[in-house]
């Protein structure tokens, strides 16, 4: 099968320089941040918002730190299940893996808020701009998950099933759930938000991050049905919800609430930061 052959030909290491190995996962983060910064700058210019290249560098540096710190702490809190209490030094072993999107989201928002104190935009404007570029990073990250052969899907007989190197589960074909998420959480959300950003006047403040949260929460909730839960967590509520689903439900509610609030508060008045 094409996908099966493709997986077995993929190496998680992009290239090596001496003893230093650079992984596709790390490059996905790097290019994801660059792409997000580019989208912030481009959309801001179209909306006639004064943002310089230096501003974007400041924003993305803070956001990158927030994503990494928040993503790691989120994994420790939500998925660690007591392990990191017994092994606190392991929190700093990022090379062993373990990042949480939901924690990274909180970290990104905090980082953007702190950076914005120097940039001078309204916080909601900056978060809306960032939400348009963020799905590109999600797309690259999920593709890197596929390259790494992690976050497996459940067993399937569908023609696009992939046989991962899964010693514990035997030679079975599984849903490429990483690619499902790359398509839905990355490509689809980006297309929706980018098309909305082309409308004139721009949608009211808060509507973009609201749409992002709503769509991500819905897509993540659905894909989790064909994705294996984290081994150390298993299923949680009612014996069929995963931690990812439990954490995604509040995102859907928050997204809908933000969309309703943004239209009731700002309507079609445009952006205070726009010229």
Image (spheres, helix red, strand yellow):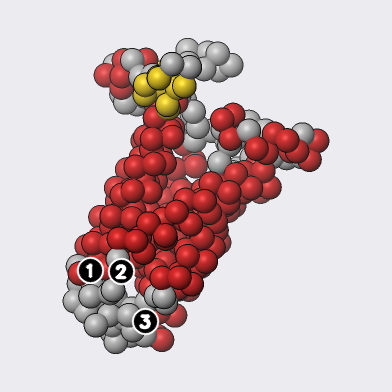
> In the picture shown, does residue 56 fall above or below 144?
below
Name which of mark 1 and mark 3 comes first in the sequence: 1
Q: Nearer the viewer, mark 1 or mark 3?
A: 1
The residue pinned by badge 2 equals 51
What mark, if any, has residue 45 been given in the picture? Answer: 1
- Seen at 47% across and 21% down, the residue is 20
From this viewpoint, is residue 246 visible? yes
- Seen at 33% across and 48% down, the residue is 34
Q: Position of residue 191 (x, y in %)?
A: 25, 55
Name which of mark 2 and mark 1 comes first in the sequence: 1
Name which of mark 3 and mark 2 comes first in the sequence: 2
The residue pinned by badge 3 equals 263
> In the picture shown, does residue 160 fall above or below 248?
above
Mark 2 in CB contact with mark 1 (< 8 angstroms): yes
Q: Secondary structure at mark 3?
A: helix
Label 2 to label 1, Cα distance in Å?
Answer: 7 Å
Residue 59 as seen in the image, left or right of residue 199: right
- Seen at 27% across and 80% down, the residue is 274
Q: Secondary structure at mark 2?
A: loop
């Amino acid at each position: 099968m094409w996908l099966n052959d493709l997986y077995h030909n993929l190496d998680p290491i992009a290239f090596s320089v001496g003893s230093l190995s650079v992984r596709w996962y790390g490059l996905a983060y790097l290019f994801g941040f660059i792409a997000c910064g580019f989208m912030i700058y481009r959309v801001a210019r179209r909306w006639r918002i004064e943002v310089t290249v230096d501003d974007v560098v400041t924003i993305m540096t803070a956001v990158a730190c927030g994503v990494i710190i928040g993503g790691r702490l989120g994994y420790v809190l939500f998925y660690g299940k007591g392990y990191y209490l017994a092994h606190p030094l392991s929190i700093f072993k990022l090379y062993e893996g373990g990042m949480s999107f939901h924690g990274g989201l909180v970290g990104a928002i905090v980082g953007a808020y702190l950076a914005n104190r120097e940039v001078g935009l309204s916080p909601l404007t900056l978060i809306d701009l960032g939400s348009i570029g963020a799905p590109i990073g999600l797309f690259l990250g999920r593709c890197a998950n596929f390259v790494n052969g992690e976050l497996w899907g459940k067993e399937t007989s569908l023609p696009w099933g992939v046989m991962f190197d899964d010693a514990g589960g035997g030679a079975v074909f599984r849903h490429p759930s990483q690619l499902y998420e790359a398509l839905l959480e990355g490509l689809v959300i980006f297309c929706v938000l980018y098309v909305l950003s082309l409308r004139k006047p721009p949608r009211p403040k808060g509507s973009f991050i609201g749409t992002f949260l709503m769509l991500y929460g819905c897509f993540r909730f659905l894909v989790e049905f064909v994705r294996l839960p984290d081994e150390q967590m298993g299923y949680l509520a009612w014996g069929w919800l995963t931690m990812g689903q439990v954490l995604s439900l509040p995102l859907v509610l928050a997204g809908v609430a933000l969309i309703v609030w943004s239209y009731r508060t700002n309507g079609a008045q445009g952006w205070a930061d726009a010229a």
